[in-house]
Image: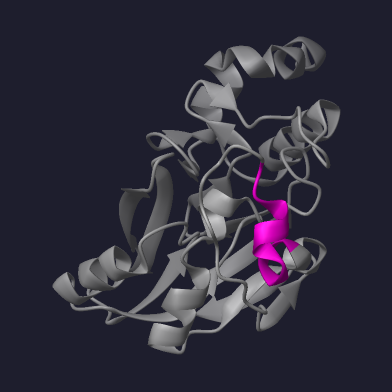
Amino acid sequence: MSLDVAQLPLGPFETNCYLVRQDGASDAVVIDPGFDAAAIRLELATRGARCTAILITHGDVDHIGAVADLAEGTGAPVHMAEDERERLERANDFVPAGIPVRVRSYAPDVLLKGDELLDLAGISFETLRIPGHSAGHLAFAANGALFSGDLVFAGSVGRTDRPGADHEALLASVAMLAERLPPETVIYPGHGPATTLGHELATNPFLAELRASAR
């Protein structure tokens, strides 16, 4: 079974929202609806798809900004790490100073810890706990794809200079992914283009410590 993945860079930070479904299926999962629920729903309609579940990798404002509107408009249940729930339930309390956005709070329907298997839209998603950029960060793996949020990007990694972030934890999370997933796994990150796990392990300058320790 192959996945049909549509990448929508939305909002002032061009945060990637993903629409994920089986090829030709009508049910889809939306991952990280950060901004503009109307644009997400329009893209779903254009593709002849409907949102049946919402997955959140972590609670940064640019990954949750459209959750309330999309969930209410579609009736889709929201899945989120239990450790990150406050960041959605009290969303505006966590908006960084200087970012002029307001976010509607929402209570997630399904709380996750990591290592769950979720059967959504006919796709089996494995939840992987990947702290580093944020303490409760999750990734979602399915059919050779990894939706990694802000852990690792093409040629870069997520910020670790904010409360709850930890650079050593981030490196440990990437090392765990390298042990559990094949190098050809396609990474769909929270920002920027898709890449592969093997390419980032071999070339990403921010992962040089991992390469050195593997020698």
| x, y percent for residue 40 | 31, 66
Q: Is residue 210 visible?
A: yes
Query: What residue sits 81% from the left and 14% below the top?
Result: 213
Q: Which image quadrant is residue 69 in?
A: bottom left
44 with respect to 105 (left or right) = left
* Direction bottom: furthest residue: 75
Query: What residue sits 66% from the left and 40% below the top?
Result: 97
90 drawn magenta: yes
State the residue in front, 78 or 73. 73
State the residue in front, 4 or 91. 91
114 with respect to 49 (left or right) = right
Query: What residue sits 67% from the left and 19% below the top?
Result: 207
Position of 68 relative to 197 (above/below) = below
30 drawn magenta: no
Q: Quadrant of the C terminus?
A: top right
| x, y percent for residue 25 | 27, 79
Q: Is residue 122 visible?
A: no
Position of 42 relative to 120 (above/below) = above
Q: Main secondary structure of the magenta part?
A: helix
Position of 153 relative to 38 (above/below) = above
Range of magenta residues? 87-96
